[in-house]
Amino acid sequence: MIKKKLMVVVSLLVLVSMLVACAPAATEPAVPTEAPVAATEAPVTAPTEAPAAITVAVVAGGEVGDMGFIDSANAGLQRLSSELGLNTVIVSNKNDNNNNLDVLLSAAEQADLIFVVPGYFFDEQLKQVVPQYPDKTFVYVDGASSIEGMTSVVFKQNEGAFLMGTLAALLTTENTALPQTDEAKVIGFMGGADMPVIHDYQVGFNQGAKYAVEDIEVINQYAGTHFDPAKGKETALAIYGAGADIIFQAAGPTGLGLFEAAKEAQKYAIGVDTNQKNLAPDWVVASMLKNVGDSIFLFTQSFLAGEIQTGAVMSYGLKEGGVGISYGDMDPDLVPQEVKDKVAGFAQDIIDGKVVVETYTAQ
Amino acid sequence: MENLAEFLRASIRLTTPLLLAALGGAFMQVAGVPNIGMEGMMLIAALVGYIVSFTTGSWLMGLLFGVLAAVFVGLIYAFFVLRLKADIFAIGITLNIFMGGVAAYIIRQYYDQISMLHSPNAKLLPTVSLPFLAENKILNVLFNNYTILVPVSFLLVLVTFVVFYKTPFGFWLRAAGSNPLAVSASGKSITGIRFAAFIISAALCGLAGVHLSLGYLGMFALSLVAGRGFVALAIVLFGSGNPVTVLIASLIFGIADAASLRIPTEIIPPQFPLMLPYIITILAITLMSRFARSFTSTEQK
């Protein structure tokens, strides 16, 4: 019996020592011991406009350097600091959900306006924290929150997806077609997990494709998960195999598989959320962007002007610059100028209200 | 016809990682020690294989070190289970979680990435092209130009079968699972036999992991394995370690998976095709286990 207990103790010790042995030998910040308080990475400047002396915080569900939402949010903060002279602070959960409550509390103590990026990482903790600070404004980024006292920022992904639809349709059709496309006018949409926000992309993409080229055929397929790149590749290969020349993905990490499939099938791909050109430069024609940073800047401006009421849902689409398109800053640039002009024209149609892009919930 | 061939090709691609891992699982299963740590072994092999491939520029080194990394995990597993007599399930699950942490730590600390590694310098596993197959279009689609571990995985079914049922080692391996007392009585070391099973099993899981990153996807992502270790475990349990049954179960899962990605969502809501692999697997497994039971009962007569 004693021997058995001893064994348990020994095995625990070995496990712990393995953990310790894996700690970095000589790297600067000792990550685990550092308290999750403000990592002030954005420059803090003194307020210049007297009435607007507020502090704006971003609570990041990730770290600066993700080449995605967090970097974009950080860029927005830097604009607030340099252009409006606001105090800014960014606190990161360091990719560990156990820190969520602490970073939220820390931000609430320091700032008046708190952006939570992305909101859905912090649902549980926000329910606790928001009622504790009734005089602070919490903004749920990338989704409409039902939490009492929470203001939300949503992106009109259907408008961005609409543009991608027009782009893909133009690039597979005769005069403007890319070299590796066939006669048939077929394009594809690949979704990840089957959830409403992804259907919103799908609806916009399909509508855009048909708006640009009437007789286009769109193959819509779901991988069924957001977290399996191998399955994403297989799904993309199935869509290419069914005749599609270009695929637009809205599938999180699963979507990474699309770029490998594009290389293998020698067909084209469109990225999502951030500029994904670097993942397959020869085959990615463009990426749809969600401009988190610009939205934070716009929201703060409206907030300072007193235009925002607590609990409001602000939606940012093409008109506001909340979503957009990037052709990537790498060679080769696959899209002819003629097509870019046409796509810009379609974007203007949406901004002018000539086209109303359908949303999934409106169906 | 060509579509059917493409479909079967996709099925084979989806089968391979499951088959490799499940064969590995079979080695431990028949020796009476179920391998719960396959998920972690695959993940660490996929990561190490990819890193070594893009730092050395050699796929062979990537393959070798990926497998060695998995074997190292297997050694830790064996040490806890065989030497310290810890619970095999507890340690297996702990290792899976731990390896997830190790992988995340490595790519964040040393490569400054959040959830994936992607390097243009990575040398991927070569593909096997047979010119005589290229002449026939259907055969070409079905059997040609796979990455090297795909044909190897099917060959390994045969090898495993021979090892299990035609060699003295296989005999002792199965005896260690079905009648450990008899093995001890005959003077053989159960621990020694099971230790060998751990190492072989880990090496095969390593192949599965390297296949995912270097053979199939061409990148590493933290979610790369995506539960395939557990699916493989299910396959092993259903087949109770028999390599032929393991092959059949892996193929069923691969085919159902490929089918689920091809059913047009306009006709059927996307939720239904996604259920397909699981429904087919459950049905097939139920039927198979009935078969197996009637087979063994006649055998005992």
Image (cartoon, coloured by chain):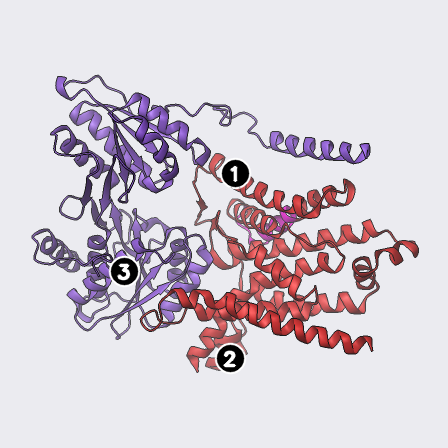
Residue B24 relative to residue A171: left or right:
right
Residue at the spot x=73%, y=35% of the render? A8
In the current view of this chain or complex, which residue is farthest to the right?
A: B186
Residue A96 shows in the view:
no
Question: Looking at this view, is B153 or A118 the one in front?
Answer: A118
Query: Label 2 lies in what chain?
Result: B
As measured in the structure, the alpha-carbon distance from the residue carrying label 2 to the one carrying label 1 is 42 Å
Looking at the picture, which amino acid does disc 2 mark? Leu
Query: Which numbered disc flags the more N-terminal residue, 2 or 1?
Result: 1
In the picture, one chain is red; tell me its letter: B
Q: Position of residue B15 (x, y in %)?
A: 55, 66
Question: Looking at this view, is B170 or B80 the one in front?
Answer: B80
In the picture, one chain is purple; tell me its letter: A
10 Å crowding of disc 1: few (<14), some (14-19), many (20+):
some
Would you name the residue on which mark 2 appears? B139
As measured in the structure, the alpha-carbon distance from the residue carrying label 2 to the one carrying label 3 is 36 Å
Q: Secondary structure at mark 2?
A: helix
Q: Which tag is nearer the camera, tag 2 or tag 3?
A: 3
Would you name the residue on which mark 3 appears? A202
Q: Secondary structure at mark 3?
A: helix
Question: Is A214 in the magenta?
Answer: no
As measured in the structure, the alpha-carbon distance from the residue carrying label 3 to the one carrying label 1 is 36 Å
- Looking at the rendering, the stretch of residues picked out in magenta corresponds to B56-70
Q: Can you tell which quarter of the image residue A192 is in?
A: bottom left
Contact, mark 2 vs mark 3 (Cβ under 8 Å): no
Q: Which mark is residue B106?
A: 1
Looking at the rendered image, the quarter that the C terminus of chain B falls into is bottom right
Looking at the picture, which amino acid does disc 1 mark? Ile
Question: Looking at this view, is A17 or A245 the one in front?
Answer: A17
